Amino acid sequence: MSYEPEVLRRAYQRMKEGQRLRAEAFASKKAMIYHQLPRVQAIDRQLRQGVVQAATAALKQGVDPAPAIQALRAESKALQAERKDLLTQAGYREEDLVEQPQCQQCRDTGWCGSTMCVCLRALCAEEQVRSLSSLLDLQGQSFDAFRLDYYPDDPGPNGVSPRSHMKLVRDICQGYAARFECSGVKNLFLSGSPGLGKTFLSACIARVVSERGYSVVYDTAIHVFGRFEAEKFGREENGSTLRYLKCDLLILDDLGSELTTPFIQSALYELVNTRLITGKHTVISSNLSLRDIALRYSGQVSSRIAGEYRLLEFWGEDIRKLKNSSF
């Protein structure tokens, strides 16, 4: 998985801050024990200096240092036993004077070889949720909070009510997020009129997937294509759009709200096609139908969406208007 540099930076910063606070707490506890048990401090100093002093003295005298070191080992065992007794009598353990890493797997480096450790991944997930929360109301948006009572329960011409249909849509989105890494469906296309819950369910997906440790980028189509244009014409550094291409899940919201130009048509094709080739997951929401997509962008884009995305149509009435009319 590939987290955004800013998310990774903040996670590292939190990890280092945690290390600093733990080091301060350890130093404070160690100082307290030494103050309470000065003999223990003297023993520790003697143990640290003993081996070096014995070896240095023997070498200066031009004799074999082995006998001196052997004698020192016996003395060290006696000192260690005395130290343990002093600590035990005072209610401490020997481990209380040994600084331990919080994570035993990576020793607080954040990495196990070339693999990100679970401790750093958890911090990245938390920071990513924070980033998404600045764009989406993740706290108030969950699959359980998706209210089906806003959708009519009367069957339509096809014999299916908007409520039962939207329950199916919600369940598909929930399953997509829950089985993100092994789902047979990698991409979703959420299509329907404004105010039917497309952004809400997109936020629910973003929350679940990011909390599970995957990199998620949410952005509106207007802003995404604005970044592509800025990069092309030199207003932003090259590589600023890589976040949209490399993240585990891209949520492209409100496709069709932007002013469509030949450049944007090309950028959309590049975005969709690159993510398909690299096997990345994408969720696109739009007020447009697949037919509208073909007319507005290109047959290439619409054919890829039709062939590689699960189409979820949103039915019902504008929920925002229903909420306002209830006051």
Image: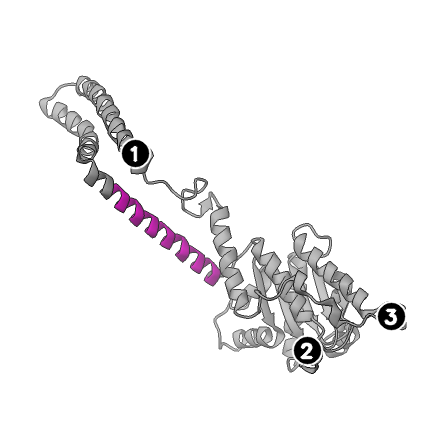
Is residue 23 covered in magenta?
yes
Q: Earlier in the sequence, mark 1 or mark 3?
A: 1
Local secondary structure at mark 1:
loop
CA neighbours of label 2 inside 10 A, class few (<14), some (14 to 19), many (20+): few
Magenta segment = 6-30
Q: Position of residue 173 (x, y in %)?
A: 70, 60
The quarter holding residue 290 reads: bottom right
Residues packed near mark 1 inside 10 Å, few (<14), some (14 to 19) or many (20 plus): few
Query: For the C terminus, which image quadrant?
Result: bottom right
Alpha carbon distance from label 2 to label 3? 22 Å
In the picture of the structure, the residue carrying the numbered disc 1 is 91
User: Residue 242, which numbered label?
Assistant: none
User: Looking at the picture, which amino acid does disc 1 mark?
Assistant: Gly
Q: Which mark is residue 323?
A: 2
The residue to which callout 3 is attached is: 155
Q: Are marks 2 and 3 in contact (CB under 8 Å)?
A: no
Kindly report which numbered mark, 2 or 3, lies closer to the viewer in this rendering: 2
Q: Amino acid at mark 2?
A: Lys
Q: How many marks?
A: 3
Residue 183 in picture, x, y percent from top left: 70, 52
Residue 116, visible in the rendered structure: no
Mark 1 to mark 3: distance in Å?
73 Å
7 relative to 222 in the view: left or right: left
Whether residue 52 is in magenta: the answer is: no
Picture coordinates of residue 302, whole percent (x, y): 75, 70
